[in-house]
Amino acid sequence: MKTRLTAIILVAASILMACTPKPKEDRHGNYVIKDNMIVFDEPQRAPGQQSVLQFAADPIENVRIGFIGLGMRGYDAVDRITYIDGVTVTALCDIVPDRVESVQTDILEARGLPRAADYSGSTESWIGLCERDDVDLVYICTDWVNHVPMAVYAMQHGKHVAVEVPAATSIEECWQLVDVAEQTQRHCMMLENCCYDFFELTALNMAQQGMFGELIHGEGAYIHNLEPFWHEYYDNWRLKFNQNHAGDVYPTHGLGPLCQAFNIHRGDRMKTLVSMSTPSYNGKKIAKEMMNTEEFANGDMTTTMISTEKGKTLLIEHNVYTYRPYNRLYQLTGTEGFANKYPIEGFTVLDEKLPAGFLAEGQHLNPHGFVPAEVRDKIMKEYLHPIAVEIEEKAKEVGGHGGMDFIMDYRLIYCLHNGLPLDQDVYDAAEWSCLGELTAASIANGGMPVAMPDFTRGDWNKVQGYRHAVK
């Protein structure tokens, strides 16, 4: 009797389980919606492929560089690099031959340097540059859609890569960069210059010294009306891209410095995001005027919230269409302090966090407001990042967004000279760039949460704390 009762119970349980509805899972291209969460496909690491977390290549005494793209960003990049010792510009590439010749005469010859090999006049010219034996680093400053094909080909031919922002335009491209960097054991650095702004470096140094307590929230933005510049992009490539892509297509200026301060894939990771945007008003108007089209996918204002594995939050904004002041927001909120850049640079710190004698006798800081201007300026000097201390004077002389572009190039070459891990690795490039497609998916599904891919494939907690490598 007992055996029969047990059998009946087991049969009933199996019937009940069979009738219980399974979690709904809808496939949409390269992601599924499961339990009200968008989850993108994450390929496993292929056999023989090795992580490049903290990767360091053999030192290169003289870094031989080939530049691809000599328009808005590339021309200035060549100029800056000639002020760094231990580099040689060996090759130049642009679809427009006059741009190559301009760099040859106005930069290289003007500084008494030899002319570089010329690759121009064809959309395939860059292939020959990547195949050269006398190129150690390929520096890519082209339109966004060419970043990954060029970077992948260069790494496959033994070259390290530095690529302008964003490094990739889709999740698939982000995985390509990661996989090829791991397969070839080559560096792939995204050229996020805002990580080297003097304010961001100072705030990072203060955060790492505990001046703000525990960081709990950060905000970053790229708000820049591009109306005066749309006509300057070759073949209108940027407006065309925005016409076809919703979401935050240019997130890295605000996100990159925050990820360093919050130790992303160095003890924490971005876990989930939600995003929403306004309709396209001004973007559609510009597209009508320049392209004679009524269709425009990119909303005028895009707002994204990100949560991390440790429960921290980040807010990222994108707007390149409306009439408002330039705002490259960078904001750190800690349990014991605050840092803010744009529209006002300032800090909120507690008296006891400052060194003895830092404040005037009897002076006390307001914990509900910014420190006075004279205290802020003193803080900027006292906590200036060691990298900025080392190179500040020359950086401001050479220039590039006030010197931060030069510091970026200087650090890249310094790490290659000394065989050190780069300040930004390929996982940074993927994590910071992937917001484009992730935010578009969230917006398309009514602000649904998106699980952020782990491009380190589980290694995000192996390094504790972000640090610039030094010899």
Image (spheres, rainbow, N blue to C red):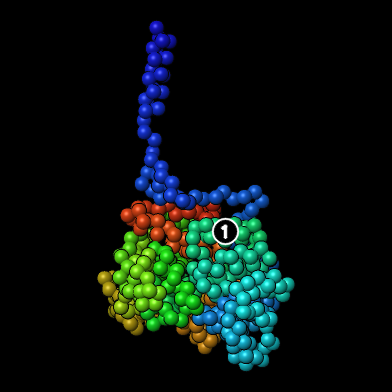
Residue in the image at 38% along x and 17% along y: 9
Residue in the image at 42% along x and 52% along y: 451
Q: Which residue is mark 1?
A: 176
Instruction: Decide: is 254 above or below 77.
Output: above
Residue 316 visible to an observer of this rendering = no
Quadrant of the rendering where the N terminus is positioned: top left
Residue in the image at 49% along x and 64% along y: 169
**Left/right of residue 326 with respect to residue 130 in the rendered view:** left
Q: In the figure, residue 159 lies in which quadrant? A: bottom right
Q: In the figure, residue 58 lies in which quadrant? A: bottom right
Total marks in image: 1
Position of residue 347 measured from the top left corner of the image (x, y, whole percent): 35, 74
Judge the density around disc 1: few (<14), some (14-19), many (≥20) Cα neighbours within 10 Å.
Answer: some
Q: Label 1, secondary structure: give it.
A: helix
Residue in the image at 32% along x and 68% along y: 280
Position of residue 369 measured from the top left corner of the image (x, y, whole percent): 27, 73
Quadrant of the rendering where the C terminus is positioned: bottom right
Position of residue 243 measured from the top left corner of the image (x, y, whole percent): 40, 68
Q: Nearer the viewer, residue 221 or 352?
A: 221
Q: What kind of residue is marked 1?
A: Gln
Q: Nearer the viewer, residue 202 or 248?
A: 248
Residue 453 visible to an observer of this rendering = yes
